[in-house]
Amino acid sequence: MINYTERIALLVDDLVARVPALSYIDTSRLLVFARFGRSQADGAYATCHCVNLPPSEPGYYFWRDRRTGRVTRRSEWFVTKSPIVQLGPRPIDFLISFCLPRFCDQTFARSRKSALYPDAEPWVAKLDTIVHELYHIDPGGCGIRKILRADGSVSPHAHSPAFFREVSRMVHEYLASRPNPLAYDFLQYDFQELARRFGGVVGTSFRPFPSFPQRYVEVAPDQPGEADPSVRVEPIKRSAVQTRFTSDDLHVREFMAETSRRLVAKGQHRAA
């Protein structure tokens, strides 16, 4: 079987080595993993996740009376935190998830980025998506890249026309560097062809699937008193959220058109 996430990780190493604009990325602190996503369903092909953000400033939710605008109740004060992801001695700062089999079946059809690749083969759309997610990694190494407006202020949006153009420029630059086709040849095949050629498609995932490390809410240790006794304080729901992940939380899954199944025991995230 082809270990799809492992092949993407090797391609990422080659991209970072060949494209100067991506050379700031430390791939030893980046983990590629797979999530399930049907080809015929809408949704993202891939997503970049940052897991090294510091805790947020304390805050709370509140509710107002629609008629008077007065605050009638609020939550406890809380902070949001990033989980710790560490593989042996290696801390992980960023995760990139790929939705299988949806990512494998991606082409330029009905894509707004097709205009940037007028003569490209359909599989280059997948290469564009990989570079796109890498480019989301902030050069400062903490958080997702900020998009700046013309006046220098930070845009609330994650993309801009210039972002898509820069990704396309890097894709063309990588291909012009004449990389070994073995680094990217697997992108040429859709999911059905991959399964036929290799006998199946597997990838690294987190357990318990489909969960994965995400920011979580924790009650702040210091709870200021409520000045207005008429405002009711609602407790934050305590849930059993996993806050630390290691190699033992990884396993290999086989992905199929409509489902996936665990293939290899925990802690083993490479295909045999």
Image (cartoon, rainbow, N blue to C red):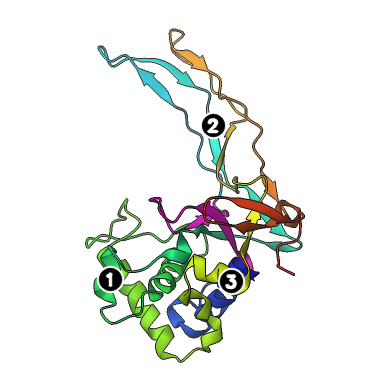
Q: Amino acid at mark 1?
A: Ser
Q: Amino acid at mark 3?
A: Ala
- Left-right relation of 149 to 7: left
- Left-right relation of 11 to 61: right
Which residue is found at the position 75% from the left and 70% from the top?
Answer: 272
State the residue position of label 3. 9
Dot 1 or dot 3: first in sequence order is: 3
Give percent across and percent down for residue 115: 24, 73
44 in the magenta segment: yes
Which numbered tag is attached to residue 78?
Answer: 2
Residue segment shown in magenta:
28-53
Q: Nearer the viewer, mark 2 or mark 1?
A: 1
Of helix, strand and loop, which one carries label 1? helix
Label 2 to label 1, Cα distance in Å?
A: 44 Å
Dot 3 or dot 2: first in sequence order is: 3
State the residue position of label 1. 114
Dot 2 or dot 1: first in sequence order is: 2
